[in-house]
Image (spheres, helix red, strand yellow):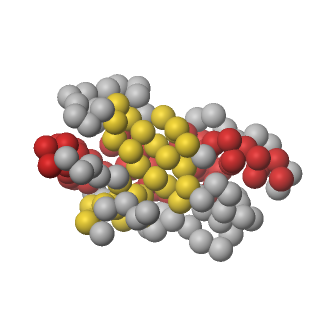
Amino acid sequence: MEAPFRFAIQNLQDLEKLLAALEASPDLVPGSLSLTEGMDLLTEQFAAEGRLRPPRSMLGLFRVLWRRPLQAQRPRFLRLQAQVLVPPPPMLSLRVDVPTVDAFPRWIDAEGSRGPAELAHLLDIYRRLSQVSQLPFIAV
């Protein structure tokens, strides 16, 4: 299922800007940003390609993936989550496609909510992240 919102990115520097904005966001619990999905498959793919284990640092991991993309897109994406300081929703969730030799991510998917109040709050957070990171934020 396609996420309803996206941050457009062109390169690793754009992703780094968004990660920095997430880490510094007053809307999120400090230190709560984490990789919550895809790491197990990524570790298996690194081993299958004869690579060292992926770095534990999120920024280090993305730098390694940009310098040397995967041969196969396994996992398809990595999920990043951060705890929202004033819920609802309790978590902010983003997905980044894994770079491969055939394709690099062009956007970071931002998930929404079915609840109108939660969605409005998420959109406010996403718009502030867009301003701080200077990345376009679009509805799909």
Q: Residue at x 20, y 28 (%)?
A: 86
Where residue 6 sits in the image (x, y, percent)?
34, 61
Q: Point out the residue furthest to the front here.
A: 114
- Could you tell me which residue is drawn at 25 percent across and 28 percent down? 85
Tell me where residue 139 sits by quadrant: bottom left
The quarter of the displayed image where residue 73 is located: bottom right
Q: Is residue 106 left or right of residue 41?
A: left
Measuring 51% from the left and 65% from the top, which residue is drawn there? 105
Report the residue that reaches farthest toward the right.
50
In the displayed structure, would residue 5 be above or below residue 84? below
Foreground residue among 138 and 66: 138
Q: Quadrant of the C terminus?
A: bottom left
Coordinates of residue 45 in the picture (x, y in percent): 75, 52
Q: Which residue is situated farthest in the bottom direction here?
A: 102
- The answer to whether 30 appears left or right of 104 in the picture is left
Q: Which is nearer the eye, 97 or 9?
A: 97
Above or below — where is 101 with respect to 50? Answer: below
Q: Is residue 99 above or below residue 58?
A: below
Taking the image as drawn, is residue 29 in sight? yes
98 lies left or right of 95: right
Residue 122 percent across, percent down from the top left = 22, 46
Using the image, determine if residue 108 lies above or below residue 102: above
Question: In this orientation, which residue lies closer to the viewer: 131 or 72?
Answer: 72
The N terminus lies in which quarter of the figure?
bottom left
Residue 126 visible in the displayed image:
no
The image quadrant that residue 98 belongs to is: bottom right
Residue in view at x 41 percent, y 49 percent: 94
Residue 56 in the image: state x and y as whole percent: 63, 34
